[in-house]
Image (tube, rainbow, N blue to C red):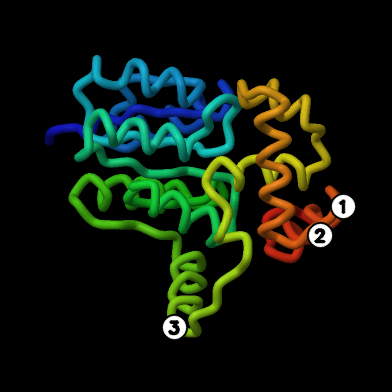
Amino acid sequence: MKKIKVILVDDHELVRMGFRLLLEGANNLEVIAEFSSGEEVVSEFLNYEFDLIVIDISMPGIGGIEAIKRILLKKPKTKILVLSAHEDDLHANRVLKAGAKGYLTKRSAPSELVEAITKVVSGETFLELEIAKSIALKQVTGEKEPIESLSSKEFEIFLELAKGKSVNIIAETMSLSPRTVGTHLYNIKQKLSASNSAELTLIALRAGLLES
């Protein structure tokens, strides 16, 4: 049987090691490369023959969502599965809009990860059941949250601000200027009708984006 060749992207070495062992425990999967950032995978992935990229989205630098967009600009038919710690449908919606074909949380069973990889490689879209239900319900009811008006970069910065991080720390982590982050902060507050960071934290908590 031909093995499915996987590129694994996560900024935590121990996480990558764990998922490599998990994936290689399956008879039909092989991890052929690992990267620790969006910048690395965007720069190097074309040097490999692979079937799928499994990527985290919460990483320093450009992050996973921007990496997905840049990968697909270089190679539009690339199949990408997001494996994330975020368990909300807002993140799932954003990665699907960016072009990923699947979204799975890191709490999922090993068998579900193997199933997700197999389905995405075969051309299907895969969503974890609870997330799929939540997205479907919103589509039926027409419900839309103000957070969905944020751009990808605004969304990433919003989450960091909601966690209590300063503009300077966010700028350093994301390789942006403090002035750029400040501009994003102004736009975020306008779109979410928030006057300070405490209100941003409250909005994120209500949306299920942070642990209370």
Q: Name which residue lies at 62% across and 26% down.
A: 174
Q: Name which residue lies at 13% across and 33% down.
A: 2
Closer to viewer: mark 3 or mark 1: 1
Name the kind of residue labelled 2 in the image.
Leu
Name the kind of residue labelled 1 in the image.
Ala
**Around disc 1, counting alpha carbons within 10 Å, would you say few (fewer than 14), some (14 to 19), or many (20 or more)?**
some
> Distance of mark 2 from mark 3, alpha carbons?
26 Å
**Please, what secondary structure does the residue beneath circle 3 have?**
helix
In the rendered image of this protein, does residue 188 appear above or below residue 207? above
Q: Quadrant of residue 160?
A: top right
Along the polypeptide, which appears first: circle 3 or circle 1? 3
Check if mark 2's residue and mark 1's residue have beta carbons within 8 Å.
yes
Quick one: 118 or 39, which is closer to the camera? 39
Quadrant of the image containing the N terminus: top left
| Tally of numbered discs | 3
**Around disc 2, counting alpha carbons within 10 Å, would you say few (fewer than 14), some (14 to 19), or many (20 or more)?**
some
Along the polypeptide, which appears first: circle 2 or circle 3? 3
- Report if residue 1 is visible in the image: yes
**Please, what secondary structure does the residue beneath circle 2 have?**
helix
Residue 136 screen position, x and y as percent = 43, 75
> Distance of mark 2 from mark 1, alpha carbons?
6 Å
- The circle drawn on residue 24 is none
Residue 154 screen position, x and y as percent = 61, 45
Q: Which residue is mark 1?
A: 198
**Please, what secondary structure does the residue beneath circle 1 have?**
helix
Q: Which residue is mark 2?
A: 202
Residue 212 screen position, x and y as percent = 81, 57
Name the kind of residue labelled 3 in the image.
Val
